[in-house]
Amino acid sequence: MAASVVPVDPFDLVVVGATGDLARRKLIPALYHRLRDGQMPDSARIVGVAREDMDADGFRRMAGTALDEFAGSDAMDAALKHRFLSTIDYVPMDVSDASGWTRLGEALSDDEARLRAFYLSVAPRFFGMIAEGVHGAGLSRPNSRIVVEKPLGHDLASARALNGCFAGHFDEHQIYRIDHYLGKETVQNLMALRFANAFFEPLWNARYIDHVQITVAESVGVEGRGPYYDGVGAMRDMVQNHLLQLLCLIAMEPPARFEPDAVRDEKLKVLRALAPVTNAEDVVRGQYASSPGIASYAQDAAAATSHTESFVALKTEVANWRWSGVPFYLRTGKRLRARVSEVAIVFKAAPHAIFPSASGRSTQNVLAIRLQPDEGITMGMTIKEPGPGGMRLAPAVLDMTFAKTLGTADMRMPDAYERLVMDVIRGDQTLFMRGDEVEAAWEWVDPITRAWEERGDRPALYDPGSSGPDDALMLMHRDGRRWREISA
Ligand code: NAD
């Protein structure tokens, strides 16, 4: 089965911060692949905006290098690359300089019907300035869109201020807040599994589910981002957005329709139902120590007495009828054993054991949704061990990736940004966060970070390459459960 591609209408996409890391590593390669697959028309235009003083040819050379580096060597084709680079223009400007916006306007199509999107791939301190600049120069039309990346605030107050600043110039239906985890194929597959199959939903509740684990582990440290990261930490950088968004998709009620506000209304209800974490033992902070040849967090961040967490594990509950009593365990951290992102739904054991103890024990069913490194979905089952040796039970894994069935085994998995940028152009906000969702997430996070600040203690140290601090293991052991292995 070949993936069908529906071409989008011609558009002007302004990438503000086009020479930066995100644009070069993700956005430019994503757009190249969409042109390659016939989804982005040749008449579309990508207009790079950044401080660097160069002409359009200079930026095309930079974009070409980014493609060589990040688009995948098997995807490179000289003629296609030339076609793609022909869609690119560049306007050097400082976003604080009002005259720059007029120059940008001259580079854009004056066809009123043509869609315009502004992708803000710059630090958030520029967001307000850019929204005002775009508006002030009359560049925004009713069909224009603005796309922003995390961090969307530092706490509830700053998130509200940011939302207020966008709302001053754009309607909510024009604002696309990206959480790139939601663009991952497997995350969307989670919704298909839940809502397009009859047999999961009856089991999807406190009666049959024992607990849920969400892990986003990285094997690298903070790398060159140390000074930036030190003002943020794992709770704000990962839990407030990616992990809570994943939790929402697992816990939400079936929306009436797969439409942006129907889905986002249900996610918002989950965020508002999250039980506050009031027990200090239910949240564990960690910071990676040094090991031979590996710098500690404090060294990476150049902050010897830093209180910033590079790891967090916590237990929460979605306090509603469906989930009452089901713990949701979340953990994320840097310099852990492997790079892996996974959601695991752990079902309760079969209620009654009919097999003699000599047969062995049945294992709990686990539905594991892996987002990286290899996207896929598996179901842990108990089966009879094959052979004539009597009834012996054995664990087996049912692979529900369906790559072979769908004929996609050799197909390149599109990067999340490919999907999300095309959704912006199509005007589909389903996979983007609404302003009230972002605020509700901060409302839950704020008391936790505030309590840490008030306590003033430092996170527990953990060894690089480990699963985090021992207290994180205890968090589950106390409940008679254990984390799944962090393994690639
Ligand atoms: P970066 O520092 O690599 O690039 C910043 C870009 O902004 C450059 O093109 C620079 O020229 C431009 N810029 C800076 N000041 C400017 C000014 N006054 N006027 C015009 N242009 C200016 O940053 P990045 O890593 O690409 O990140 C961009 C945004 O995306 C940040 O908010 C970041 O938090 C967010 N983000 C990045 C990633 C990533 O993978 N890099 C992932 C998620 C979110």
Image (tube, grey):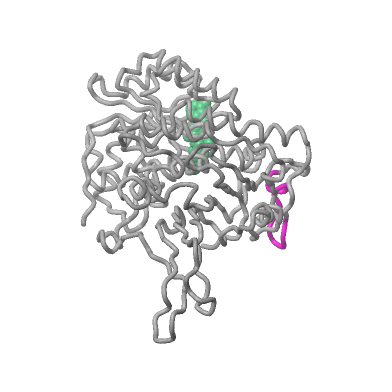
Residue 327 as seen in the image, left or right of residue 72? right
Q: Residue 281 appears in which quarter of the rendering? A: top right
Please state the horizontal and vertical placement of residue 90, each as a whole percent of the image.
37, 31
Q: Residue 132 appears in which quarter of the rendering? A: top left
Q: At 70% from the left edge and 49% from the top edge, which residue is drawn?
A: 287
Please state the horizontal and vertical placement of residue 286, each as a whole percent of the image.
69, 48
**Residue 400 drawn above or below residue 43:** below
Residue 241 as seen in the image, left or right of residue 59? right
Q: At 25% from the left edge and 39% from the top edge, which residue is drawn?
A: 40
**Residue 407 drawn above or below residue 149:** below
User: Is residue 277 on the magenta stretch?
Assistant: no
Residue 79 visible, this orientation? yes
Residue 21 visible, this orientation? no
Which SS type dominates the magenta stretch? loop
User: Is residue 295 on the magenta stretch?
Assistant: yes
Q: Which residues are magenta?
A: 290-301
